[in-house]
Image (tube, rainbow, N blue to C red):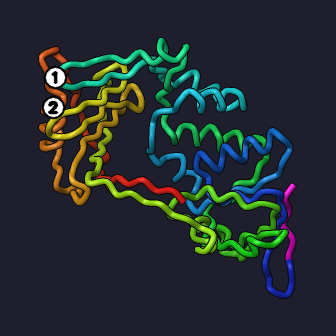
Amino acid sequence: SAAFSLMPPDNISTMRTQVGIIGAGPAGLLLAHLLHLRGIESVVLETRSREDIEATLRAGVLEQGTVDLLNESGIGERMRREGMPHEGVILRFGGQSHRIHLSELTGGRSIMVYAQHEVIRDLVKARVERGGPILFGVKDVSLLDLDAQLPKIRFHDAGGATCELACDYVAGCDGFHGVSRSSIPSRLRQEFTRIYPFGWLGILVEAPPATEELIYAYHERGFALVSTRSPRIQRLYAQCHPQDQAGAWPDARVWEELHARLAGSDGFKLTEGRIFQKGVTPVRAYVA
């Protein structure tokens, strides 16, 4: 397994593994777990702390293929116990709800409401229990010799020491803002971007669910989404201008707009509660 040794005279701690994985999000951690199941060593590098990555609230719905993969790889026990399977979704327009029965239309497939940070907790726990190295709190990550037989990742560890990880492969799982994408030479990289003329106002609310399944609502004032994170936390979205700031949306305005977009003659009523997170995300599509 990977081990450190001091390399004079540069005073750099060196490390060797088969796959160096940058980023301890769902992609990096699941990759590390799948490699472990096949006897392939890896080291995961993450700039944030374990507490930070396990507490960051992100997307909350897993599709059937992801659920199957987590179960097949031995990570799905808590998901099966605590997750909320949804066999359909609700499309709402013209003041009426129309249910699409996913399971009937797809031979039993469904979606699972189980938040991304819960998946991360399960993957980190599995990684730690199996002795797989995750280096949290690293800084100044750079990729070296990517076109050589033995690429390297240089970084400062949580204690400030300079370290170098030599590996057969580098897996960049650090997203748009990470170092991996920008380390690919521009002559070898193609990028495609589309900017959409709207944004999403997203809120997290302390409230019981207003619906048993996700509601995708179309209204002349804009789109709205009623989702859930847990029996106590709900996730709601409203389409807005991409340059809006969260401060322009006080709680009273948020609820007024959501009620208007979800109103109808069928008696549906949105459940209000304490809004404890609010943000506006401009929408774009990006492929590198």
Instruction: Tell me which corner region of the image, top left, top right, bottom left or bottom right, holds residue 165.
Output: bottom right
Image quadrant holding the N terminus, namely bottom right
Picture residue at 83% right of the left edge, 59% below the top: 17
Q: In this view, does 218 lie to the left or right of 46?
A: left
> In front here: 86 or 65?
65
Image quadrant holding the C terminus, namely bottom right
Question: Is residue 13 a member of the stretch shown in magenta?
Answer: no
Q: Establish if 63 lies above or below 194.
A: above
* Residue 94 position within the rendered picture, expressed as x and y whole percent measured from the top left: 16, 24
Q: Is residue 41 left or right of residue 159?
A: right
Q: What residue type is labelled 2?
A: His
Q: What stretch is highlighted in magenta?
A: 1-6
> In front here: 142 or 204?
142
Instruction: Tell me which corner region of the image, top left, top right, bottom left or bottom right, holds residue 187.
Output: bottom right
> In front here: 153 or 146?
146
* Residue 36 position within the rendered picture, expressed as x and y whole percent measured from the top left: 79, 43
Q: Establish if 262 lies above or below 250.
A: above
Picture residue at 30% right of the left edge, 45% below the top: 202
Label 1, label 2: how far apart the Cα atoms are: 11 Å
Residue assigned mark 1: 95
Picture residue at 58% right of the left edge, 42% below the top: 120
